[in-house]
Image: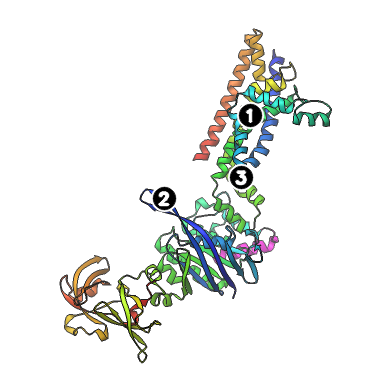
């Protein structure tokens, strides 16, 4: 039974970690651009990135299959380069987790960046600092708490991801069975004991995430 | 000329009318030149002072014109030059506190010294601490500083990279009067030391007089007058300037009766009243305004003479006396001309002359103190 807990736990953590790192890097850049730039099509792009927050995960999974499958636009390119598809691998699970958790990061970080007084940035420009330097030295450090809160939310969302992962990465024992999927499997196969343990672990992890965000967001408002 | 600015820029100002907030559009239109001196930008809020600073610093782009500082062209519409903010070598202290809250005083000041050699950086930092007397604040964070200390650090930060022009946007508006006056004096001595052009925004008349070698008066975006404080105070170009400079007792029913070349004076007729003012560069029969500051009116006891319009001496009736602490505000009515004048005099003076409401007295309007100008 230990083996049946250990692999999903490890896999879930690994997927959440990789996904969160990607979300952190890309999400902060997207949030900064949304907060500080105006361009044509910005509203549309904002809606597009926020969409996974409201769409059913199975719909997201289906759309991702259209995009990532062998005949999909991106999937085809990947197949040409790697000689193999990424459907039904842990990488596919990362893509699913990334897609559903990115909007949480972008929304939280964007609000935090928008709250940074623009005059502070102008003051830095006048002192000769470039925009990138100013973003790294002034804006992002001052939006730090919002970004950390976004990161914790994204991480928690990745850990709990089920629908889109199931569609894109499947349910392959020892390969793509994350915690959420293993709970479903255990329940289906009548292994109540295992289901209970896995549920307990996920509840504890979620509580931890809430406690962490509570701390960050609380400090942000204070 | 070390600074030459001639720009126009359309800008919006939100006006709150009852509960509705409407946007009104104005044209910023400023053209002036200055040397290494301290020029105060003076005008009511919404007159475009901050917009003007943002144009100089490059935060916003003017619609038209040129901005040059020393030999550097910051902006030239015709030559399509618009230097990025970072390339303009200027110091800017904002109205609000813009110290970086997550950096201590040292880090804040050194922010503008990137790329300096370690030794010269340290030397410059020490010079700044010394110049603004903030040695003991080096390791503190902005949240641990008082309002006055913050603005001194902000000044140090702005001056550290050796700017060629310094812009100060109401830097002391959030401070108590006492600290405010102290820091204003500090700016005055600083200007003598650093010898760069310094532009200072304020809407506090006292501060403007204390600091300015020259004042540029703005009203609804337009530069109205540029000159020394005394020049503007006694020779405002129009009613806007006169009112911005606190002139009350303004009468707009006057016209030029005649000029007296010999005594360098001009005689105005204002209703039934005749008044002699300093020589006014206007044609006879031109319509003009005249006025006098409440502090500049002389009151005399009624026994000391009788009305003599050639001497600007009028008989008046005291309507009311209001106590304003060390001063008293007296409202008078000129008996023969039905004109109301507000006078401000030291309380002690009223007591010693034993003036009371409904008494009469003589009013003397010193020729040199009477201000006359085209109304608009």
Q: Nearer the viewer, mark 2 or mark 3?
A: 2
Establish if A98 lies above or below B143: above
Residue B122 belongs to magenta span: yes
Label 3: which residue? A140
Question: Which chain is indicated by disc 1?
Answer: A
Q: How is the image coloured?
A: rainbow
Question: Which chain is indicated by disc 3?
Answer: A
| Magenta stretch, main secondary structure class | helix
Establish if A215 lies above or below B259: above
- Label 3 sits on a secondary structure element that is helix
Q: Nearer the viewer, mark 2 or mark 1?
A: 2
From which residue to which does the magenta span run?
Answer: B114-131
User: What's the residue at 23%, 70% (across, down)?
Assistant: B330
The percent position of residue B74, horizontal first and vertical second, equals 63, 65
- Label 2 sits on a secondary structure element that is strand
State whether residue A157 appears in this view: yes
Establish if A78 lies above or below B300: above
Q: Is residue B266 left or right of residue B36?
A: left
Inter-mark Cα distance, 3 to 1? 23 Å
Label 2: which residue? B21
Q: Looking at the image, tell me whether mark 3 or mark 1 is earlier in sequence order.
A: 1
- Number of dots carrying numbers: 3
Q: Is residue B53 left or right of residue A2?
A: left
- Label 1 sits on a secondary structure element that is helix
Q: Which mark is residue A156?
A: none
Residue A35 belongs to magenta span: no
State whether residue B212 appears in this view: no
Q: Nearer the viewer, mark 3 or mark 1?
A: 1
Label 1: which residue? A100
């Amino acid at each position: 039974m230990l083996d049946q807990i250990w692999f999903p736990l490890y896999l879930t953590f690994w997927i959440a970690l990789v996904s969160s790192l990607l979300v952190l890097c890309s999400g902060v850049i997207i949030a900064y651009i949304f907060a500080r730039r105006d361009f044509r099509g910005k509203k549309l792009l904002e809606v597009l990135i926020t969409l996974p927050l409201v769409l059913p995960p199975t719909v997201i999974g289906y759309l991702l299959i259209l995009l990532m499958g062998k005949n999909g636009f991106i999937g085809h390119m990947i197949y040409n380069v790697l000689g193999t598809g990424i459907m039904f691998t842990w990488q596919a699970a990362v893509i699913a987790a990334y897609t559903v958790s990115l909007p949480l990061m972008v929304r939280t970080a964007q609000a935090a960046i928008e709250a940074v007084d623009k005059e502070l940035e102008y003051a830095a420009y006048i002192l000769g600092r470039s925009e990138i330097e100013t973003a790294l030295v002034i804006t992002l450090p001052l939006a730090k708490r919002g970004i950390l809160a976004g990161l914790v939310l994204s991480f928690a969302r990745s850990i709990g991801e089920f629908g889109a992962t199931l569609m894109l990465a499947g349910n392959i024992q020892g390969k793509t069975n994350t915690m959420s999927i293993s709970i479903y499997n255990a329940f289906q196969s009548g292994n109540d004991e295992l289901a209970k343990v896995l549920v307990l672990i996920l509840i504890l992890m979620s509580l931890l995430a809430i406690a962490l965000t509570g701390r960050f967001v609380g400090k942000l408002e204070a | 000329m070390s600074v030459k600015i001639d720009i126009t820029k359309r800008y919006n100002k939100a006006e709150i009318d009852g509960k509705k907030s409407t946007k009104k559009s104005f044209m910023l239109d400023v053209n002036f030149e200055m040397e290494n001196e301290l020029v105060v930008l003076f005008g009511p809020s919404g007159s475009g002072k901050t917009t003007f600073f943002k144009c100089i610093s490059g935060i916003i782009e003017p619609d038209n014109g040129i901005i040059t500082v020393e030999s550097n062209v910051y902006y030239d519409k015709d030559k399509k030059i618009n230097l990025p903010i970072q390339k303009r070598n200027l110091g800017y202290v904002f109205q609000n506190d813009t110290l970086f809250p997550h950096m201590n005083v040292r880090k804040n000041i050194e922010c503008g010294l990137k790329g300096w050699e370690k030794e010269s950086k340290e030397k410059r930092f020490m010079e700044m601490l010394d110049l603004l007397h903030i040695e003991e604040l080096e390791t503190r964070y902005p949240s641990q500083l008082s309002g006055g200390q913050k603005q001194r650090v902000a000044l140090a930060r702005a001056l550290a990279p050796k700017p060629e022009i310094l812009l100060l946007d109401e830097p002391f508006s959030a401070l108590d009067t006492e600290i405010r006056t102290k820091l204003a004096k500090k700016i005055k001595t600083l200007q003598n030391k650093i010898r760069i052009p310094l532009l200072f925004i304020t809407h506090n008349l006292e501060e403007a007089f204390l600091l300015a070698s020259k004042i540029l008066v703005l009203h609804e975006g337009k530069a109205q007058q540029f000159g020394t404080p005394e020049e503007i105070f006694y020779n405002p170009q129009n009613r806007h300037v006169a009112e911005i400079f606190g002139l009350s007792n303004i009468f707009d029913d006057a016209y030029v009766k005649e000029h007296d070349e010999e005594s360098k004076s001009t005689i105005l007729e204002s209703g039934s009243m005749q008044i002699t003012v300093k020589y006014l560069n206007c044609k006879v029969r031109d319509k003009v305004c005249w006025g006098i500051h409440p502090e500049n009116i002389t009151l005399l006891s009624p026994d000391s003479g009788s009305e003599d319009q050639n001497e600007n001496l009028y008989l008046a009736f005291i309507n009311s006396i209001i106590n304003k602490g060390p001063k008293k505000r007296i409202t008078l009515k000129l008996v023969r001309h039905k004109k109301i004048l507000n006078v401000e005099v030291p309380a002690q003076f009223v007591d010693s002359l034993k003036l009371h409401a409904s008494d009469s007295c003589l009013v003397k309007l010193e020729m040199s103190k009477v201000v006359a100008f085209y109304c608009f």
